[in-house]
Amino acid sequence: MIKGRLKKFLAFATLASMVIAGCSSPTGSGDSNAASAQKEPAAASKADGNSLSLFIPNYYNNTEKLQWESVIKKFEEMNPDVKVTLTNGDVNTESGKLTTMLQSGVTPPDAILMNAGPGRVRILSEVGLIKQLDDWYTQNNWKEKLQPFAYQMATVTDGIYELPHTVDAIQVYYNKDIFVKYGIQVPQTGEEFVAAMNTLKANGVTPLNTGARTAFTVGGLYSNLLQAAAGRDAVEALLYGEKKWTDPEFVKSGELLADWAKQEYIGKESMSLNSSDLQLSFLNKKMAMFVSPTHIISTIAENKAEGNIGSFNMPSFIGGQKTNPTGGLGYTWVVPSKAAHPELAEKWMNFVLSEDYANVVLGDPSYNLIPASKAALTVKPAGELLANAMKEIEVGVGYNPSVFIGSEAKEAYYQNLIGLIGGLVKPQEAMEAIAAGTKKDQAAGYQLTRK
């Protein structure tokens, strides 16, 4: 059972993370730029003719805004009879704002780019707020245009309600000059990774940080650690209900997380940081490493730090095993059931899967997302960090559990991971709480199934 002091802290932490989630980007994945104004989507109208209304996440920075402008320019060049209207806002289901907007009676956008995850999409599909897309998949041959992993993740429940936009790749980013200064090589084993953290700590450098005030940053770090400790296959079996959170390998992963915090490999300040704080701290070299999806790349580019930042997969603690970036789907497109122009949304989605789209985004060295299309695999990314991430996921992708678990399990997952870092809960108790949340989701009918 979670202790009283943990409950008090988590009541605040959960509120803080919900506020941040209202303007976040991922996968459960990102934290938007505070300067990016939150706006509700403009109401569409049947009289708009060929006006395509898109609702997308808030921008991290001005670099992302310029990226989207280039994408829209290309689409309108290819479709001169269509005018695109972009609106930014909350694309999470966790805050409830997206659901409220779709239930409001106002004509919704034609397509929404939301944070992906079967549990998130299910919240909208179960109550008929978004269109089922099986017919579009057949008519447009989308199965063959998506990378296999992306298609698999879009079809883990009955019926298809989304078109994957991006695939996440969560890795360890590091300051090269700090590694060089202390004679640290990129670690190849779990033991070498711990040795590197020991060296950094001994020299007064914080090895890692995360942000309890933005829960998904904790989830990203743990997804890497979980794969390293338990193995990709075990995590997959866990998410498909074939293993339990209380199994020894998963309790072990919780013990490692708690121990890293106790040893101060994870800085004490993690309990008071959010995602924006983390990025600033990393780029200011107040910590050596930062576990993140590729979203950070645009911020690295905006700060002209590309030459000093490298990335690698957190290595395995299981002898002989290799690791992959962890992740899942990052963003995904859905079409509101009451969209005014679903035919234009379909046209847009075909564009997103095209080589034309891939050339625009991957030709920009500051671009920070991995397209889910097969067409993207034929285009060499201009940015080195993104190219490295895309090369790594060609071999395979591990799992970021927060993308795949249900709402009850996710709440327990974030709360208890934060509790482990803060020393407020024991590993066995944490895994029991997540397992209890999983049982509630299963009782409500949520469970990933293999096809």
Image (tube, rainbow, N blue to C red):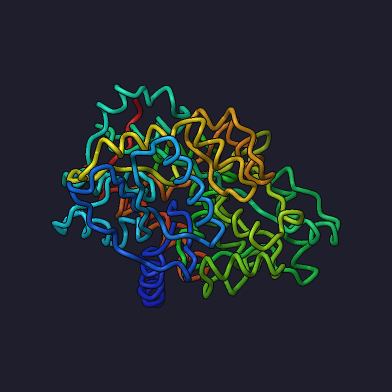
Could you say which is closer to the camera, residue 119 or residue 57?
A: 57
Snapshot quadrant of residue 238 = top left
Q: In the visual, does 148 lie left or right of 62?
A: left
Q: Which residue is outermost to the front? A: 80
Q: Which residue is outermost to the left? A: 105
User: What is the quadrant of the N terminus in the image?
Assistant: bottom left
433 vs 318: above or below: below
* Residue 241 visible at all: no
306 vs 324: above or below: below
Q: In the visual, does 58 lie left or right of 187?
A: left
Q: Position of residue 353 (x, y in %)?
A: 44, 32
Q: Residue at x 19, y 43 (%)?
A: 337
* Residue 99 visible at all: yes
Q: Residue at x 38, y 26 (%)?
A: 142
How many numbered markers are drawn? Answer: 0
Q: Residue at x 59, y 40 (%)?
A: 362
Q: Position of residue 439 (x, y in %)?
A: 28, 48
Snapshot quadrant of residue 16 = bottom left
Q: Residue at x 71, y 44 (%)?
A: 189
Q: Position of residue 41 (x, y in %)?
A: 29, 59
User: What is the quadrant of the C terminus in the image?
Assistant: top left
Q: In the visual, does 400 lie left or right of 93?
A: right
Q: Position of residue 322 (x, y in %)?
A: 64, 36
